[in-house]
Image (cartoon, rainbow, N blue to C red):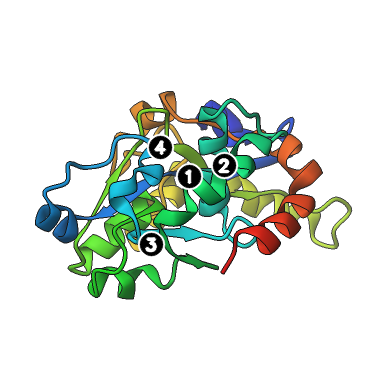
Amino acid sequence: PELDQLYPVARLNNDMAAMIDMGMTGLAYNTRLFKEKGWAPPTSWMDLADPKYKGRVVFQSISTSTFGLQAFLMLNRILGGTDGDVEPVFSVWQEMIDPNVLEYISTSVNISEMLRTDQAGLFPLTYAKASRLKLHGLPIEYVAPKEGAVVHAIAECVIANGSQSELAQKLARYLLTPEAQKLALKHSGSEPSNLNVSSTRETEAAVKDAAVIAWDDVNKSRAVWNVRWNKMVQR
């Protein structure tokens, strides 16, 4: 019954896992820098390739960051690729995206300082993380690209034949309830996957237009992509 309360995209892999925290990865930008330059807010994933942002893009490594990988895959889709075939984006990355990149980072923890010093101008990020940075007084706004933001989530599953299977199932069910998700939203800003919990954003509209990554296709080749990325792209 708990699964029936969730957004459809929150049910994963034949219900063997379920999202308990659902966000949307889109683009975030430095409002102070954009105002100074007279730039309009970004609207597309392809803005990462706009020459006017040369030296202002911060991009998370696809080998260590889901945000970076999701942005990489969305650019690849726009260029005609699929989640299982990323040759389109790899083939043009160094000439199309790389010149704009100030720094490739392993995680998003450095974003706050790079915003504070106006080094970071444009970068992939979730709505929730952008909102938290904004609450700390940093010059940041989030946009959902017109091609769709990407579903980003923390999911849960119970290990088969565990020593505490009954308790594990009880906890898993509880974390999907409105009661638990309201507490998570209140105390940590975790975006609910439960349809019956009001979110800090327009969850229903965001999910309707969201892109969902075909992780089964990605995982078949991700190790190979990581090696190629680290050799060709990362600095």
Report the disc number at residue 96: 1
Contact between labelled residues 4 and 3, with CB atoms less than 8 Å apart = no
- Residue labelled with disc 2: 92
Q: From the viewer's perspective, is the residue at label 3 or at label 1 nearer?
A: 1
Q: Which residue is drawn at 66% across and 56% down?
A: 229
Report the front residue among 49 and 66.
Answer: 49
Contact between labelled residues 1 and 2, with CB atoms less than 8 Å apart = yes
- Residue labelled with disc 4: 46
Q: How far apart in space, not on screen, are marks 3 and 2 (Cα)? A: 39 Å
Sequence order check: which comes first, mark 4 or mark 1? 4
Q: How far apart in space, not on screen, are marks 3 and 4 (Cα)? A: 31 Å
Give amino acid for label 4: Met
Other residues around mark 1 within 10 Å, as few (<14) / some (14–19) / many (≥20): some
Sequence order check: which comes first, mark 3 or mark 2? 2
Other residues around mark 3 within 10 Å, as few (<14) / some (14–19) / many (≥20): few
> What x and y, as percent, mark residue 178?
44, 42
Q: Which residue is drawn at 78% across and 54% down?
A: 223
Give amino acid for label 2: Val
Report the front residue among 39 and 30.
Answer: 39
> What x and y, as percent, mark residue 234?
59, 64
Contact between labelled residues 2 and 4, with CB atoms less than 8 Å apart = no
165 lies above or below 74: below
Q: From the viewer's perspective, is the residue at label 3 or at label 4 nearer?
A: 4
Report the disc number at residue 188: 3
Looking at the image, residue 211 sits to the left or right of residue 26; the answer is right
